[in-house]
């Protein structure tokens, strides 16, 4: 029989009205709240990063390839689609898909308002599914049949909710767009096929989505010329390696830019949140460790007479320390079980019912997001158990200094 474990189970089952029972409940609650807070923080952090990144990648890809230019405007110098990146994307094992795009500046005009914006042209091969999360109303662009010839293009566009509210437009309306290209100004009557909302100012304030073939026609480009390529990766974690590989493999006059650099402020903001959560995690673990040390010291002081009797009967210091170590581990286990129930329960509640809203102008989304990362949950539990378990050796060290004669007379 494991005597220290047997005794620890007995003293952990103190009467509900006793002082020990109250201390045990405080210990369990302390560990539970600490672990639950850490779990919720990681679930929310993962959700924030995933939602913001998905919105950025949906509109820009993971990597963009354009031609070097001294022009500071958003409009690109044309690139031929007759290159290895577009024609043979499978030659790069890290690439999921490659799509063409082009930008063209213009003015949207209604009877009452004028609004400056950039049209981002996408091809018929664009993955429309990635826009669904941001599409509030309507549908995606309806591209004309390929049999219409090289000069056929769609007049459908997607505009942001912000632009729609400013110009008082809705799905199904038509709007004129002026493309000023000195010495010529061209006008197109465009049809609003859908309204999107990313809550990201860089997109919502200035980007409308249209057919790249329209921009090719406006720029007098053949269908083999585009503004650039958006590269979507199989694994986002490969972005640095993929960027370096493309820079080495593609022509010298092509500029390869990862989206992390193009939208540096947003990614730095995400990294800042990540650092804050790590600091927060450290503080919570420190408090949990401090609490378990204090509580074990109180339990040891309350059991001073018992310790004296055990020493008088010949028990070794290591055996008595094991009693309180086991007792502490039992409390940690109960606290972690309760903490997981609270943390995962809150995550499930927010994930399915979105009970906590957010201001999209400040947070890029309308509700607190949750991402289920069970690997992180398991690692966080292991980290908590190991660190808090190790500090149990600190309070139990006081047992070695207890004199059995004084302890038996202790009151």
Image (spheres, rainbow, N blue to C red):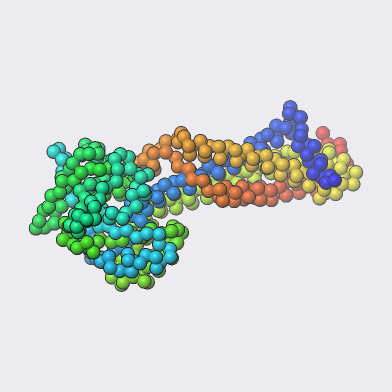
Q: In this view, does 342 lie above or below 156?
A: above
* 265 vs 232, nearest the viewer: 232
What residue sits 34% from the left and 41% below the top? 361
Relative image position of residue 362 (x, y in whole percent): 37, 42
**Left or right relative to 406: residue 299:** left
* 386 vs 1, nearest the viewer: 1
Residue lying at the far right in this picture: please name it: 313
What residue sits 28% from the left and 54% below the top? 124
Q: Is residue 333 above or below residue 229?
A: above
What residue sits 37% from the left and 49% below the top? 130
* 358 vs 129, nearest the viewer: 129
What residue sits 46% from the left and 34% below the top? 353
Q: Can residue 235 be seen in this view?
A: yes
Q: Is residue 204 visible?
A: no
Classify residue 88 by image quadrant. Answer: bottom left
Relative image position of residue 320 (x, y in whole percent): 81, 46
**Left or right relative to 142: residue 295:** right
Residue lying at the far top in this picture: please name it: 17
Relative image position of residue 268 (x, y in whole percent): 41, 53
**Left or right relative to 188: residue 282:** right
Relative image position of residue 342 (x, y in whole percent): 58, 37
* 236 vs 326, nearest the viewer: 236
The C terminus lies in which quarter of the figure? top right
Residue lying at the far front in this picture: please name it: 147
Q: In this view, does 100 lie above or below 246?
A: above
Circle count:
0
């Amino acid at each position: 029989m494991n005597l220290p474990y047997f005794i620890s189970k007995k003293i952990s089952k103190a009467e509900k009205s006793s002082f020990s029972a109250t201390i045990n409940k405080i210990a369990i609650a302390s560990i539970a709240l600490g672990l639950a807070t850490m779990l919720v923080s990681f679930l929310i952090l993962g959700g924030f990063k995933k939602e913001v990144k998905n919105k950025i990648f949906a509109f820009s890809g993971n990597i963009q390839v354009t031609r070097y230019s001294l022009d500071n405007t958003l409009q690109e110098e044309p690139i031929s689609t007759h290159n290895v990146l577009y024609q043979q994307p499978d030659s790069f094992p890290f690439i999921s898909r490659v799509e063409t795009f082009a930008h063209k500046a213009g003015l949207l005009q209604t009877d009452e308002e004028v609004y400056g914006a950039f049209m981002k042209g996408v091809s018929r091969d664009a993955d429309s599914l990635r826009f669904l999360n941001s599409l509030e109303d309507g549908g995606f662009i309806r591209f004309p049949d390929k049999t219409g010839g090289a000069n056929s293009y769609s007049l459908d566009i997607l505009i942001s909710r912000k632009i729609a509210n400013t110009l008082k437009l809705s799905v199904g309306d038509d709007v004129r767009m002026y493309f000023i290209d000195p010495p010529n100004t061209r006008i197109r009557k465009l049809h609003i096929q859908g309204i999107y909302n990313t809550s990201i100012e860089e997109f919502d304030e200035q980007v409308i989505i249209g057919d790249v073939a329209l921009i090719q026609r406006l720029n007098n480009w053949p269908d083999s010329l585009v503004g650039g390529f958006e590269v979507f990766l199989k694994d986002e974690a490969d972005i640095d390696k993929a960027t370096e590989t493309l820079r080495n493999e593609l022509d010298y006059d092509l500029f390869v830019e990862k989206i992390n650099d193009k939208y540096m402020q947003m990614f730095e903001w995400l990294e800042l949140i990540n650092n804050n959560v790590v600091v927060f995690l450290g503080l919570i673990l420190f408090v949990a460790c401090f609490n378990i040390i204090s509580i074990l010291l109180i339990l040891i002081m309350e059991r001073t007479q018992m310790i004296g009797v055990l020493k008088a009967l010949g028990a070794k210091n290591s055996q008595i320390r094991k009693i309180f170590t086991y007792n502490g581990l039992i409390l940690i286990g109960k606290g972690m079980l309760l903490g997981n129930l609270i943390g995962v329960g809150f995550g499930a509640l927010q994930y399915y019912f979105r009970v906590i809203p957010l201001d999209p102008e400040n947070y890029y989304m309308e509700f607190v997001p949750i991402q289920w990362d069970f690997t992180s949950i398991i690692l966080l539990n292991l980290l908590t158990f190991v660190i808090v378990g190790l500090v149990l050796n600190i309070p139990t060290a006081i047992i070695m200094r207890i004199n059995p004669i004084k302890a038996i007379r202790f009151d």
